[in-house]
Amino acid sequence: DTGVSQNPRHKITKRGQNVTFRCDPISEHNRLYWYRQTLGQGPEFLTYFQNEAQLEKSRLLSDRFSAERPKGSFSTLEIQRTEQGDSAMYLCASSSQDYNEQFFGPGTRLTVL
Amino acid sequence: QKEVEQNSGPLSVPEGAIASLNCTYSDRGSQSFFWYRQYSGKSPELIMSIYSNGDKEDGRFTAQLNKASQYVSLLIRDSQPSDSATYLCALDDKIIFGKGTRLHILP
């Protein structure tokens, strides 16, 4: 297993466009997390899944944001009608249910022009 | 709301010395504590986890937890230039991160 993977690694889009990111967790991990990180800040929790169930969403996750994990494996994060304030690094992490230790993917850097 | 406080630094430490990084947190109910290292432009990398009071050692790293005083620290012995990074303190399973402390090891 090569760890958590994320695609694309970089995304440049124009304001108002929709974007979708994908995360593939470590195969034996049933928990998957999405975070957002801006320069000089720590990662901010957005949402997490246990298997296919989305168990928690942050207040940061406005109605323009939606996340899915349809078969309990990979996950997608979609941002509709992007705004310049959405520019950030979007991080995905996974963990097993038995341990809270989370392992991060390389991230997707979003730039909204 | 749970909060995690860290000194943003930079913390400059001579090569070979001990680097000491500190973190305080607001929620007494927090059970899990983590230290992550993050190089510029990269994603966080887990260094240590600690769940009970006391010290936990792993190679050159020692994590220390004091739940009564609500702080957790990370000691890095024999600091190397490759340890220069931002160190993030985090707690609990939905992980609340601090803003991180920038560590600079002086060769």
Image (tube, coloured by chain):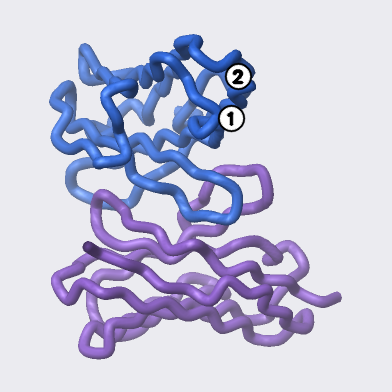
Chain colours: A blue, B purple
Question: Which numbered disc covers residue A91?
Answer: none
The residue sitting at 78% across, 83% down in the picture is B14
Closer to us: A84 or B9? A84
Task: State which quarter of the image contains the C terminus of chain B.
Answer: bottom right
Disc 2: CA contacts within 10 A as few (<14), some (14-19) or many (>=20): some
User: Residue A63 location, x and y as percent?
Assistant: 27, 24
Quadrant position of residue A24? top left
Q: Residue B31's quadrant in the figure? A: bottom left
| Residue B26 placement (x, y as % from top left) | 26, 74
Residue drawn at 43 percent across, 66 percent down: B89
> Do callouts 1 and 2 mark residues in contact (Cβ within 8 Å)?
yes
Q: Quick check: B5 above or below A49?
A: below
In terms of secondary structure, where does tag 2 sit? strand
Q: Position of residue A56 (x, y in %)?
A: 17, 38
- Both on one chain, marks 1 and 2? yes
Residue at image mark 1: A109
Q: What amino acid is at disc 1?
A: Arg
* Vertical comparison of A31 with A71: above or below: below
Q: Residues within 10 Å of mark 1 (few under 14, many from 20)?
A: many
Q: Residue furthest bottom?
A: B69
| Horizontal side, residue A43 vs residue A49: left or right | right
Subunit bearing disc 1: A
- Work out whether B88 lies above or below A22: below
Question: Mark 2: which amino acid?
Answer: Lys
Residues B32 and A15: in front is: A15
| Quarter of the image that includes the N terminus of chain B | bottom left
**Is A36 situated left or right of B32 in this image?**
right
- Picture quadrant where residue A69 is located: top left
Q: Where residue A11 is drawn, which disc sits there?
A: 2
Counting labels gives 2
Chain of the residue under label 2 = A
Observer-nearest of A103 and A15: A15
